[in-house]
Amino acid sequence: MKKETAWVLLVAGFGLAFAITIGQALKAQGMDEDDNIPFHMNGHIWRSKKAFIESGARCATRHVDDIESDEVDKAIRKAGNGRGGSGGQTSSDVSDLAALASPTVAVYFHVINNGAGIANGNVPDSQIADQISVLNAAYAGSGFSFTFVSTDRTTNSTWYTAGPGTQAEAQMKTALRKGDKTSLNIYTNNPGGGLLGWSTFPWSYAGNPANDGVVILFSSLPGGSAVPYNLGDTATHEVGHWLGLYHTFQGGCSKSGDYVSDTAPERSPAYGCPVGRDSCKQGGVDPIHNFMDYSDDGCMFEFTAGQTSRMQSMWSTYR
């Protein structure tokens, strides 16, 4: 073999080994190896999926600080529901489904559109039915079930782009919300900025009943165009907040974390589907398959027993 050829092969081999090492390091941090590829979502472009996640567009549900979290945790412990203070960091493992309450949640859909056709957000009844099916499948082990009640459709260009905390959101919800505190109101619109959705928490209902509910990007419904978030689990995720769950990465690697003892601590949100990611190095690998992380829809498929216990406690205390 010529010396020049051997040198080229040596350099190529070193480059491949270096690339594999970097790829492994990125994967260990929950980053896609091709994270420098621009990410497109709903007409917006980010320099990468990581940038999209860090922008806050994945979920705009407000962050709950430690003071409020502790107050809520004390409230549900005080209220009690016969499960030994479940829902906190010492939540018990709810493995006996017969012991669970079985709330049937009435669901009202409010389709906000900018005109006729799905391109304007006027999603068909079939997608709404599919979304209800996705919710029932996701929450099947939690005791909660979801029953469709009605859909109303409103053409309003201002509400169509309403974002969290805006006057347009308040007007939309005040005009359209139906049912009582046990009723789930889901609004579909196109809030802009690539935003996928947001939710209220159950303890917020008493202070502002009209605001209660979930808002999601219309194209995140099953079969929509918001790939890879188009299997219906944006709604699953936001309904988790509506039932009292935090993100799995709430609190990072701290002891309290998301106030559920059986979800492994997670330093930051996962994206894509980084199998084996372990960002806190204690307590187990990151819960990337949990509906309350930021993984792609196709990667998420579970709630834990502790999360079920917490949702049950929240329902008993606040709804």
Image (spheres, rainbow, N blue to C red):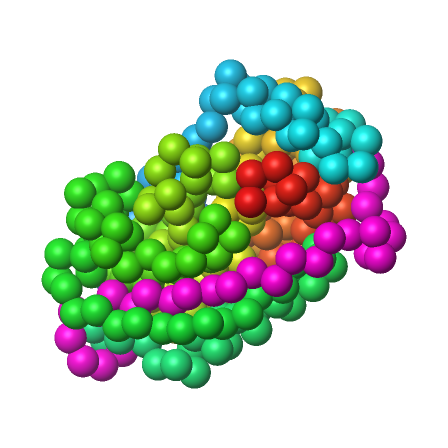
> Where does the image place residue 265, in percent across and percent down from the top left?
67, 31
Who's the residue at 38% across and 67% down the image?
A: 109
**Is residue 26 placed above or below 173 in the rendered structure?**
above
Q: Nearer the viewer, residue 36 or 126?
A: 126
The spot of residue 139 in percent (x, y) is 65, 60
Q: Position of residue 264 (x, y in %)?
A: 71, 36
**Residue 291 vs residue 111, the one in the foreground:** 111
Q: Residue furthest left?
A: 157
Residue at coordinates 22% horizontally, 81% vertically from top-left? 117
42 vs 181, left or right, is left
Please give left or right for residue 151 compared with residue 154 in the image. right
Q: Is residue 39 magenta?
A: no
Give the farthest residue toward the top: 67
Q: Quadrant of the N terminus?
A: bottom right
> Vertical placement of 92 versus 47: above or below?
above
Say if the magenta span includes residue 99: yes
Q: Look at 26% across and 39% down and name the residue there.
A: 165
Judging depth in this view, the residue of 37 and 273 nearest the camera is: 273
Left or right placement of residue 247 versus residue 157 in this view: right
Q: Residue at x 76, y 29 (%)?
A: 85
Between residues 128 and 213, which one lies in front from this camera angle? Answer: 213
Part of the protein shown in magenta: 91-118
- The answer to whether residue 58 is visible is no
Q: Position of residue 80 (x, y in %)?
A: 72, 31
